Image (cartoon, coloured by chain):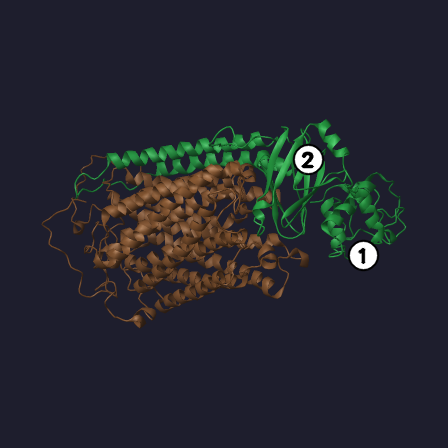
Chain colours: A green, B brown
Amino acid sequence: MPSPLPFFPEQASSFAGHVDALFSYILVTSIFFTVLVTLLTLFAAFRFRRKSASEIGAEIHGNTALEIGWTLIPLILALGMFAWGAVIYVHYRTAPKDTLDIYVVGKQWMWKLQQPTGRKEINELHIPVNRNIKLILGSEDVIHNFYVPAFRVKMDVVPGRYNTMWFRPTKVGKYHFFCSQYCGTNHAVMGGWVTVMDPAEYAAWLADEGGDVNPVSAGEKLFTQLACTTCHVPNGTGRGPSLNGVYGAHVLLADGSTVTADESYIRESILQPKAKIVAGYQPVMPTFQGLVSEEQILNLTAYIKSLQTQPVPAKGAGVAPASSGKKSL
Amino acid sequence: MSITAAVPAKTLPQHHYLNATYGIRSWLLTVDHKRIALLYLASVTFFFFIGGFFAMMIRLHLLTPSGYLLSADTYNRMFTMHGVAMIFFFLIPSIPAVLGNFFIPLMIGAKDLAFPKINLLSWYIYVIGGAFTLYSMISGGLDTGWTFYTPLSTVYSNSAVAPAVIGVFITGFSSILTGLNFLVTIHTMRAPGMTWFRLPMFVWAHYATSIVMILGTPVIAITLALAGMERLFGLGFFNPAMGGDPILFQHLFWFYSHPAVYIMILPAMGVISELIPTFARKQLFGYHFVAAASLAIAVIGFLVWAHHMFVTGQSTYAALAFSFLTFLVAIPSAVKTFNWVATLYGGSISFDTPMLYAFGFLGLFLIGGLTGLFLGCLGTDIHIHDTYFVVAHFHYIMVGGAVMGYLGGLHFWWPKMTGRMYPEWLARVSALILFVGFNLTFFPQFLLGYLGMPRRYHVYPPEFQVYNVMSTAGASILAIGYLLPMIYLTWSAFYGRVAGDNPWPATGLEWKTQSPPLTENFEVTPIVTWEPYDFHHRPDLGLDPVSTHEIMPAHGDD
């Protein structure tokens, strides 16, 4: 630690500078009002201190102009803070397209993280510098939160759904990550290190993957084991739609609406298949709730993702026709 | 302040509410709002010291990064039970149930609250709820956090969740009944001449608080009932493994628990609005605006709950709306602060103990309120949510604001409640110790939070130690600051100098009766002919009606 009484944590992501700038703006405004009110109070306490036991104050009831002034000025300053904060937040909640996607599963009390190539880590995350990184977060038990102070980002990890967060690390180094949502006994030790690496080093680290199984091949194996292949026939002749090209595309549903086939949709379709029925199909798929672990869902998702480049059959595909691909409100 | 030797020693009045009847039954079956207030005083003080003990354990444990005192499970129980005891059993009832109960009838010239028996019932409900919670604390403790987040609390926790949930559920009804009693009393039992705009600001603040109590508390009741059923009977309301939604719990929980923050702070603001005019001997600046600000806080306060959930993955649109409303609710608090400072201008300011608490409140509430902006702001909340920044902010509002207000009010009205004065210089020194200890405890936590230390950690990386040591040092000073008033106030209730009817003097109706008051408060129903906090047209106060300050009235309205 360079300073014995540090104030700002290290800035190591594209968000850090923005968050610190906004923080400084609110801080300066706050200090201004703190000093103003304190000085006025001290001045009044001294200037108008009681000088004889039976003395009373002046007869002043109020002043409407002052009231309007000290309502409007703080309001304007506050709305400025709101707007600036909103800009950063919307940027944070809208991940760019070209992200490196990493799957993160939280469980009491450890983190499992998986690279796109399948390399798995426990309580460690290796990422290349200056790449947009997206974390897809799932929990096996209670609510956790993935928090990297040096990046100024965090997101809850909620059981039963996926949350995503993104950031772009800007500085090579090792940074703490924490669980910041209280999750039981060992909440405080449920953390680890993010290692931001030079792209070449990262590539070398990734290649040296030991015996880890590729999630796509693991997912493919599961897809057969769980007999998904019986109905989801690639050429579109099965009782379920072909999954070729589905990932990332729009899916037309029985009720006429469309949905984007992202991680959450795929997860829901595995666990609650009756929630969204693809147009032209019967709700015959059984639920896999309780039969597959979070990790297995991730593997299945990785496999379905890999089918994105496979040929889409003319008939029997889950993909919606281009015309209905428009987002309906 | 000056000691005049010629004044003959005063004596307590022969008959008053404390000596009207004797015996344990006369207390446990009393329907006198003043005695019920004292029952509450004893109960909330009991819970304050339980919560304080847990706080001390937490701070001692965090002196070193590896935590030398408690196991992880014990630490988690300590901070959870600290929160539960302090919030549900001290802060929420403290000012309303003690000072509000005692003084609202006196301030409006009534004999009692509208429903004296319901008032006693609400104390018994509080005690029963407290007993369940104490049972949870001694039968394994509670480790869910005071927020009871699901599915941790309903499925995964191995602690005594059910009795605590039942205890908090029960206690809520005491809050609802107190709020109901206040609203009806304020509406129907004001003395002749006590118009709405002659009400002391303390009464306005409790009017706003009562609305929040009545509308908000049923929501926490149903939320805890659902969580309790999930815990006890395995019904999947919030558990995602059974199709439930854990985020739904947070919406329901904060729908009450955010407004509950205003249940805790509005009454303290009411106290400060009494103290500043009294000890500046001057009308409250902008009376109507301060009253309207209380109501605005109560109303807008209901619309900001999801600002506790900006990083749960809630919709971006929801986050934008709730952040916007959060900035709106900050404005009435700012308006109040400016009005309090303006009240000082042209006053005749003394530094009696209650006024020192009011000054302390101003400084701490200012910091607490302004740091709320960082949390309500979406961009910065992503970073500081769930860190020590939140802990520091919350304590600046709740301890720096609500507890300073409570202690200030207790010192202000102590002579009326007991008929006796506390040792003034000891009280002033205690107030100073509290202020210094408080800042040393909690200011470093803002820095810890921005550096990224998450809250509810029983161990932490060594780079966070410096600020933790400061905080623990501050906490030990703070503890002295709380023990001293406890001791000297208790002592003074029996042996203090006799105070007389109106020792400050103050303008409120409660000072027009004897100290301690009669059971029926007033011998004859008073008739109010003066404006609130008016020192100029009150010859009965025995003050010099001509201000020695040559201050021209500010331009604008009268």
Instruction: Report the Cα–Cα distance between label 1 and label 2.
Output: 38 Å
Disc 1 residue crowd, few under 14, some 14–19, many 20+, Cα 10 Å = some
In depth, the one of B409 and B188 nearer the eye is B409
Point out residue B56 in the picture as x, y percentages from the top left corner: 42, 50
Q: Amino acid at mark 2?
A: His
In depth, the one of B394 and B446 nearer the eye is B446
Do marks 1 and 2 share a subunit?
yes
For this view, does A235 lie left or right of residue A142?
right
In depth, the one of B117 and B75 nearer the eye is B75
**Residue labelled with disc 2:** A126
Q: What's the mark number on residue A202? A: none
Disc 2 residue crowd, few under 14, some 14–19, many 20+, Cα 10 Å = some
In depth, the one of A44 and A288 nearer the eye is A288
Q: Identify the residue at image location x=35%, y=46%.
A: B288
Looking at the rendered structure, the secondary structure element under dot 2 is strand
Up-down: is B66 above or below B414?
above
Up-down: is B225 above or below B381?
below
For this view, does B464 lie left or right of residue B238?
left
Q: Earlier in the sequence, mark 1 or mark 2?
A: 2
Q: What's the mark number on residue A285? A: 1
- Is label 1 in contact with label 2 (beta carbons under 8 Å)? no
